[in-house]
Image (tube, rainbow, N blue to C red):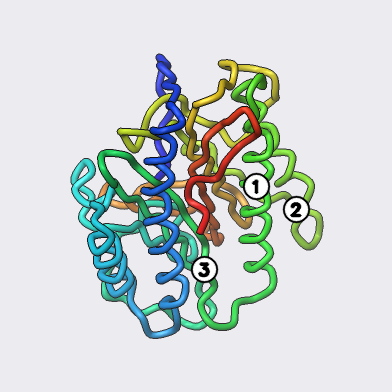
Amino acid sequence: MPVFRKRHMRIERKTPEQIEKMRRAGAVVANTLALLREAAVPGVTTADLDTIAERSIRGAGAIPSFKGYHGFPASICASVNDVVVHGIPDETPLRDGDIVSIDCGAILDGWHGDSAITVPIGTVVPEVLELSRVCEQSMWAGIEAAVAGGRLTDISHAVEKSIRSHRLPGGAKYGIVEDYGGHGIGTEMHQDPHVLNYGPGGRGPRLEVGVCLAIEPMVTLGKPDTYTLPDEWTVKTTAGGHAAHWEHSIAITANGPVVLTAP
């Protein structure tokens, strides 16, 4: 789940034992997202997906991170088409040609896992499939840049560079949503630091072994400007273009980044 940037940063370093606990929480999230990917077909509602998610998370002995978080009413965020993030599950059926970004979090033994995927529903036009691919690829570029000894914005720059290496038909740029980004994670879902998805590298705090981050780009077809619906959660693109959202939680280790929410 994305978070706004904070002014003052206090970055925690986790022990190997704590990282292993986060990996277990991440496995609950990964397994739940695998179920949701299979269940997301035309005719299914996002409320149906939410029910599946809560059952999966609680069945693993974990607690949904999102449900009740600042009043959020569901266990997942389900963001369809031009919804960027924080979509509230409802009874509207998914249709052939939609995409849905599913953000899922779980707490196991006090530790959080947080991950998001974008899922095509039925037959989706190539331009929108490519949007999701570009977004996912940029997430992996950011993860690859999360190495001990580097700087925080090395991740940001890698995400942006990956996105900017692709163009829409006709040469237009993909939009990079700037109001939301990644974050630290641990015994709280949102910790310092805020992780931008754009900007020059070589800046910000030094990345150290034991730092755990959620890296999550949000990319749009067309302009990335957004607005929030009156429900105070649902964030949509102002221009009505589709959006994609991918996220993994990672730990920085002496041997490179380890993905905590991989299946």
- Of the pair 153 and 214, the residue shown nearer to us: 214
Q: Are marks 2 and 3 in contact (CB under 8 Å)?
A: no
Q: Quadrant of residue 45?
A: bottom left
Return the mark for residue 172: 2
Q: Is residue 253 above or below residue 60?
A: above
Q: Earlier in the sequence, mark 2 or mark 1?
A: 1
Q: Considering the numbered disc 2 on the image, is that residue within a helix, a strand or a loop?
A: loop
Q: In the picture shown, does residue 176 fall above or below 89?
A: above
- Which badge, 2 or 3, comes first in the chain's sequence? 3
* Residue name at image x 44 percent, y 20 percent: 11
Which is nearer the N-term, disc 3 or disc 1? 3
Does 250 sit left or right of 88 as displayed? right
- The mark closer to the camera, 2 or 3, is 3
Describe the element under mark 3 as helix, strand or loop.
Answer: strand
Residue sitting at x 75%, y 58%: 168
The reply, left or right, for residue 97 in relation to residue 169 is left
Per the image, the residue denoted by label 1 is: 140
| Residue bearing mark 3 | 119
Q: Position of residue 192 (x, y in %)?
A: 42, 25
The location of residue 97, given as percent across then percent down, is 54, 79
Quarter of the image that includes the N terminus: top left
Query: Seen in the image, is 178 located left or right of residue 107?
Result: right
